[in-house]
Each structure stands twice: as structure tokens, then as C-alpha cells.
Image (cartoon, grey):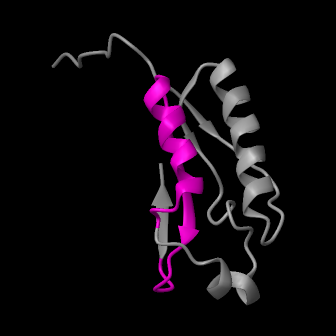
Amino acid sequence: MKIARPSETMKIGAIQCKAIPGDINTNIARHLQLLERATEHGARLVFFPELSITGYEPRLAKSLAMTGKEAVLGVFQECSNQSAYSTKARHVRSDGECSGAQ
């Protein structure tokens, strides 16, 4: 049995970063810098730590909850639309569950 080999490989980036609890705008700006750096190194799929947009801070989770439709998260979709890569980052939804922005 012969196994077909893909004609193209995909480089995947896993970002490890420290978020600032509660500072969504600064965290997103940092995510974008790291995303640019990862794509400069050829990554086409990039993952960020869970809750790294809001900063993992249980006492602030309720006040930082999102629906996933916030304009501030749209920057990730815009970047993905303009490039050949995808991103995945999770945040706390207003119902207390975790969800992903891409």
C-alpha cells in the first residue's frame, strides 16, 4: 500500500505570550505583532493561548465577557482575509463559556 504525500506542507505557529489581565486592546496589539512575526517565519495557521485576549483573570471574567461579534475581534478576521493564514484565539462569552475568534 502506497501512502500519498501532500504536495504542500503547512507550517503551524503556536504562540506563547503573557497577557495583561483586562487590557484587551494592548493584548490584541501584542497578538498582531506576534502574528506578523509568525507569518514572516512562514506560519499559515497560528494558535494563541486560551483567554490571551482578555488575560486569564477569573475575577474579571464576567466583566470581560464577549459575544464574539465585537468589532475589536474583527481585526483577526481582516488579517486572515488579507493573507494566507488563519488564527485561533479563545475568549469568555457573556454566557460564561469559552469561544474562539478567528
Whether 40 is drawn above or below 67: the answer is above
Q: Which residue is drawn at 74% across and 37% down?
A: 34
Residue 77 in picture, x, y percent from top left? 47, 42
What is the magenta range? 68-97
Q: Which residue is drawn at 54% across and 43% down?
A: 76
Residue 87 in picture, x, y percent from top left? 52, 42
> In what quadrant of the picture does the N terminus appear?
top left
Q: Residue furthest front?
A: 71
Residue 68 in picture, x, y percent from top left? 47, 65
Residue 51 in picture, x, y percent from top left? 64, 66
Whether 88 is drawn above or below 79: the answer is below
Where residue 89 sits, quadrant-wise, is: bottom right
Q: Which residue is drawn at 67% across and 60% down?
A: 53
Whether 20 is drawn above or below 39: the answer is below
Tell how many labels.
0
Q: Is residue 10 magenta?
A: no
Q: Residue furthest top?
A: 7
Q: Residue furthest left?
A: 1
Position of residue 88 in the picture relative to residue 49 (left or right): left
Q: Does the magenta stretch include residue 76?
A: yes
Position of residue 43 in the picture relative to residue 98 (left or right): right
Position of residue 53 in the picture relative to residue 75 (left or right): right
Q: Residue at x 30, y 15 (%)?
A: 5
Whether 83 is drawn above or below 91: the answer is above
> In the depicted view, which residue is nearer to us: 14 or 58?
58
